[in-house]
Image (tube, grey):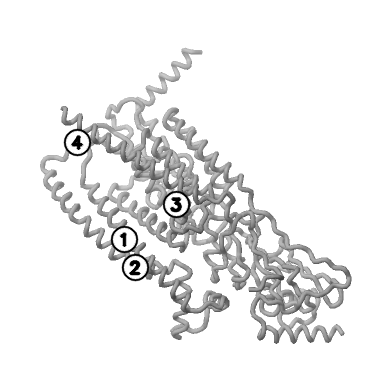
Amino acid sequence: MMRFLRLTTFAAAVLIPCLGAQGEIRFPPPEFESGYQFPQTTTPGAQPVFHEYIDVALLVVGLLLASYLILKRRSRRAVFVLMIGALLYFGFLRDGCICPIGAIQNVTLTIFDSSYAIPLAAAAFFVIPLVFTLFHGRVCCGAICPLGAIQDAVLRRPVVVPRWLESGLRLLAYAYLGVAILFAATGSAFLICRYDPFVGFFRLGGNWNILIIGVSLLLIGLFVGRPYCRFLCPYGVLLRHLSRLSKRRVTITPTECIQCRLCENACPFGAIREPTGDWPEGEYKVAKRRLAFFLALLPILVGGGVWGGYALRNQLARMHPRVRTAERIRLEELGRVEGTTDVSDAFRATGQTTELLYHDATAIRDRYGLGGALLGGFLGVVVGGKLIALSVRRRRAEYEADPASCFACGRCYKSCPKEHERLKKNREAVEGHA
Amino acid sequence: MADKQENMNRRKFLREGLWGACLAGVGTAAGLSVARNNPDNMVWQIDPYKCIACGNCATYCVLEESAVKCVQAYAMCGYCDLCTGYFVPEPKALDTGAENGLCPTGAITRTYVEDPYYEYTIDESLCNGCGKCVKGCMAFGNGSLFLQVRHDRCKNCNECAIAAACPSQAYKRVPADQPYLLKGADHTS
């Protein structure tokens, strides 16, 4: 009996797949005589949502505290302690997810895909630091963002990055922002999360390539302050421009600038701007011509960008898995490649027609045509705008922190003699009181 | 002097206007997000009817030990003596000997129920989500073994690293109050 069953089972196992479609029951579940009750499949619940509400609450409290410490108390030490606290909580305890940088993509996907419902935490993490920046400058960068904190904490011997190099490298951040929004809007990928360099440290494990990028950035970060924040961070791009408009912001001196130049090298992130006058007489004419040239160049750059982005649409569209599948299937159908891959096997197992697949892929490529053109145009505007900004001279009467580049870390405060005066007065007031 | 004063005022006016516009823009983004918000979170899950058990789940998860585990839909299981999810092809004997087992970590428990039926249960503390048993069960059995993201382990990354590497696009976001896509005997697709 036993042997017979085994044989039939085996025969069935070999033969039935030829007949049955996937998902069909080949062996009807037995009628048990022993009264056996089959167990239920266990379904452990998801992480409770209240964690995220705590995160949002702590974000608001942290930003309020950071604003107070940096603008009112003017204490670098207190900001540093807060920053380490944020690194421990948002970084190591909450595994660096969700962060404001990645939340850009959630918001983008919400706008472009009506079926996607954004988690409240992602929306809050995107919006709240932007609002705080409009009021108090980039306090989020200096004290709250775990990615900034881990780089800030390792900074040892800052070297000065020349302004032209700094401006040039910063274009990477604009490109990163543009590409990340394109991929998120088309539902292809969350690029920022995929290449988050520090999340591997926070989780204490992860993809090797990313860990190597993270370690390299931290090694660079020993000498170049916050390389990710300055040259790559896509959220930083948004904060830069909002911070220019902020109501209050970091001022190096608590009272007035005496032009002592002591703060000149105090900022490891190259955010302190020296006083400038008008163009020298000889240079003015050249500068005017240069500005006119760059203004004329702007439409050419934008046009070139639009054309280039559109031309790259098929390459860009490969980020979408559906397009990759279509390309692979097409190659196989045309006999240009040998064998199949997991991707093509999986597609064939679904039983969909290739026409549907190609139709989808074409539609996605069309979207990338528009998206690529917009991305290229955006990059043209950025490069052109940068060139124009570099050839305009703004008058400055005193040393000040560039509102766009300042991370509100408070390192420059102690370099100002007026700050020491203020602290001394405070101390005397306290002692006099006692 | 009067001219300069006016200039400063104009600049200030522009600044204030731009500031207000930015705040309105951020407010719009917030409003839109809240309007589209899901009060319950979204979590990642595998559609078992799309999964081809390629093995990426075991290696691509950001966790050292993947959050994906094999689960058993008992109602679908054939309780076979020769379980092709449990045994290697052409096993020497149908017993619990390690040389006959397909699972690389020995995470499947084979329990005698009644002649000739055996119950197969996954020990999740041993399972690494490689899907070898799933492949075996899908190929020759009822397909009652399948992979699921276990939410007691899943970190719910903003972009799931396995989803990005999934060849069959079987990963999707599902509402957190129904975080599993279980196979059932009544399913007919």
- Circles 1 and 2 on the same chain: yes
How far, Cα to Cα, is label 4 from label 3? 39 Å
Residue A391: x %, y % from top left: 21, 47
Mark 4 or mark 1, earlier in chain: 4
Between label 4 and label 1, give the one nearer the viewer: 1
The residue that label 3 is drawn on is A104
- Residue A325 shows in the view: yes
Chain at tag 4: A
Disc number for residue A376: 1
Disc number for residue A312: 2
The residue that label 4 is drawn on is A277
Chain at tag 3: A
Mark 2 or mark 3, earlier in chain: 3
The front one of A171 and B44 is B44
Asked whether the beta carbons under mark 1 and mark 2 sit within 8 Å of each other, the answer is yes
Q: Residue at x 24, y 59 (%)?
A: A301
